Image (cartoon, rainbow, N blue to C red):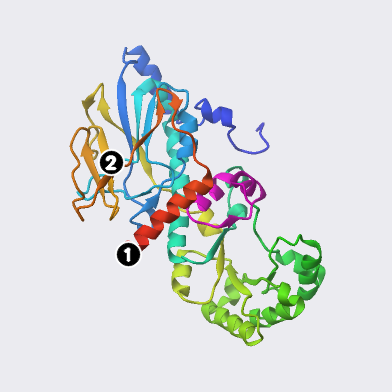
Amino acid sequence: MDRKFLVASQEEIKRGGTTDIYFIRTVDILRKEGRAEAHVDMEITSGGLPYGFTWGVLAGTYEAINLLEGLPVTLRIMPEGTIFKPYDYNGVRVPIGYVSGRYIDFSIYETPLLGLLSQATGVATYAAHLRYHAWDKTLLAFGARRMHPAITPMLDYAAYIGGFDGVSSILSAKILGMRPMGTMPHALIIIMGSQEEAWKAFDRHVERGVPRIALIDTFADEKTEAIKAAETLGERLNGVRLDTPGSRRGDIATIIREVRWELDLRGYRDVKIFLSGGVDIELVKRLGDAPVDGYGVGASLSNARIVDFALDIVQLNNKPIAKRGKFSGVKEVYRCRECYEYLVLPRGNEVGRCPRCGGEMEEMLVTAIEKGEKRPGIEEPKMVRERVLRQLERIKSLGWGD
């Protein structure tokens, strides 16, 4: 092999080099059969969501728009960070977007287009569900070591817009315009020879803007090390982090409560408790009201299951047509401003009021590319994250759950 790292370059992706071979063959056949002018409208839908989720957070549109920019196509899609459902009030699949144009002009981009949307949406959706259940707690993305480094920025971005507060990866944080967040590895404590020496060295040498969060599970019981950390750093200690391995974890909720009790008993009520290692949605749910101030989430986030999007023809040369299992024709997608119920209607039909609550319906698809030109501009990640949090607050008040 002539590559040091098995990744595609931006140029190779943009040229369609990562597509499936059958699209290349299909284009060749259509040209030779005189069908090169066939105009199609193709809709992007999902047949469901992973983990039994009933709602997802759309992500990856930023890269999808950049992929299709310059092609003679029109892309209508939900805004980045939109909370969507796979099916509407009547059981119709909800299209999250449409690509329209000559099939031969964009068919080779189906593979990368779906890949960009599917994985980013899977991570953003998992992150948003974590935020839903850990509502007022700090969430940090620690998944860089569990993913291929080439896609670290994309996955951390998806976690951030899904509701996470920070990321540990240097490059991801730079792209997101924030400071990378993290504590210390066990290696520092082992090499320094003791917990106390490691904590003091960290305090001496790391810039003051970085919180002093002591790792407290290396050599002794978490409760014992928490007390040592508080006595060693005193008022400079901002928090403690438990990264207890599975073989020692036992009843982690009780361990956390013990740590909280001992810190409070000695006057360290402001010292926060963070938990990392094996954190996933089920653990966050089980911990419930345990006194955890934040979570570092790694593998479960970076390995979040994808959302299985598909791209299907629903109209050929302005006439409705679709394969079995799909509803033909171009559709408009509406969401109720009050209860967030979705409604999908054939284009041209009048929408009326929400069938569930009678609220006002709003159109959800916006034109991101028109005949190859991007419109409007791309939003900053912080703005997308704020949109997601507003929607999460709304669905939490509606009692959506998972």
Residue 106 at what x, y percent from top left?
Answer: 41, 25
Are there few (<14), some (14-19), or many (20+) residues within 10 Å of tag 1?
few
Q: Amino acid at mark 2?
A: Val
The extreme front residue here reads 360
What residue does disc 2 label? 333
Q: Magenta span has 166?
A: yes
Residue for point 31% across, 15% down: 35
What residue does disc 1 label? 399
> Could you tell whether 226 is left or right of 386 in the image?
right
SS majority, magenta:
helix
Closer to the N terminus: mark 2 or mark 1?
Answer: 2
Residue 85 at what x, y percent from top left?
Answer: 32, 50
Residue for point 43% across, 23% down: 372
Q: Amino acid at mark 1?
A: Gly
Query: Which of the two residues, 182 or 36, is positioned nearer the viewer here?
Result: 182
Quadrant of image for the C terminus: bottom left
Q: Quadrant of residue 351?
A: top left
Q: Magenta span has 386?
A: no
Residue 38 at what x, y percent from top left?
Answer: 30, 19
What secondary structure is marked by label 1? loop
Query: Which of the two residues, 19 or 157, is positioned nearer the viewer here?
Result: 157
